[in-house]
Amino acid sequence: MTAPATTPPPGLAGLLAERAGPIPLGEVLDRLGARGHGPILLTLAILMMLPTGMLPLMPALTGALLALTALQMIVGGAGISIPARLARVPLDPAHLRAVVRWLVPLCRRLGRVLHPRFGLLVTGGASLLAIALILLASALAMILIGAIPGVPFLLCIPALLFGLGLTAGDGALVAAGFAAFAGAAGLVGHLTPRIAALWGG
C-alpha cells in the first residue's frame, strides 16, 4: 500500500514533533524506509535541492545514501542499511522542517493529478532495476563532480520524480524520472568539461 500523494514523507513530520534537538541520520532513514524507498528518495532529493545542498560534503553524503538505497532496491531489501558510524551523524531538525515545508504545498498541488497507474513502472522488476541503476549513476556523479555548481541539483531531479512516483504509486512520474535522467545526464555531460576548463583557467 502506498502513502497518499497529498502528504509529506510518512513519519518525518511525526519524528520532528517528537524530537527537539539534532536527530541521528539512522533514525530518520528508519522512519522513512518503513514505507519503502520512495520517501527516502524524496527526502534526499529535496535536501540536495534546497540551500542545504550547498553545505560542505552534502553532495558526497547524498550520493552515498542514494547509492546505498539503490543497492537495497537491487537486492530487494526494504529501507536502507548504513554503517553505524554514519547512522549516528546528527541532522539539524531545521533542515528536515524545510523539507516538510517544501513538500506540503507541492503534494497538495500534485495530489489533484497523481493517482495509481502504470503499475509495472512502480512495482515491476525491470523498472525498479532501471531506477536503481540510474540512482547509482547519479550517486557516482554526485560523489565525483558534485562540487560543480548546479550538477547535484540536476542529478536530483530524477530522484525526486522517482520518489514521488514510488510513494504515490504513479508510474507516469516514474516515466518522467527516466526522461529527466536522460536530459540531466546529457546536460551535465555537456556542461561539465566547460565548467572544468573555466576552473582550470
Image (cartoon, rainbow, N blue to C red):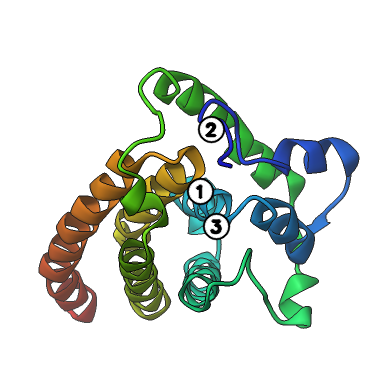
- Image spot of residue 150 (x, y percent): 31, 56
Residue under numbered circle 3: 37
Q: Is residue 96 left or right of residue 179?
A: right
Marking on residue 103: 2
Q: Quadrant of the N terminus?
A: top right
Q: Which residue is mark 1?
A: 42
Q: CA distance from mark 2 to mark 3?
A: 17 Å
Q: Of helix, strand and loop, which one carries label 3?
A: helix
The residue lying toward the viewer, choosing from 40 and 157, is 40
Q: Residue at x 51, y 43 (%)?
A: 167
As shown in the figure, which amino acid type bears the numbered disc 1? Answer: Leu
Residue 62 percent location from the top left of the image: 52, 66
Callout 2 touching callout 1 (CB < 8 Å): yes
The CA distance from mark 2 to mark 1 is 9 Å
* Residue 8 drawn at (x, y percent): 60, 34
Q: Residues within 10 Å of mark 3 (few under 14, many from 20)?
A: many
Q: Is residue 6 left or right of residue 89?
A: left
From the top left corner, tell me how far across and down residue 119 is, in percent.
36, 46
Q: Quadrant of residue 178?
A: bottom left
Secondary structure of the residue carrying tag 1 is: helix
* Depicted 70 relative to depicted 17: above or below: below
Tag 3: residue type? His
Identified by mark 2, the residue type is Leu
Q: Nearer the viewer, mark 2 or mark 3?
A: 3
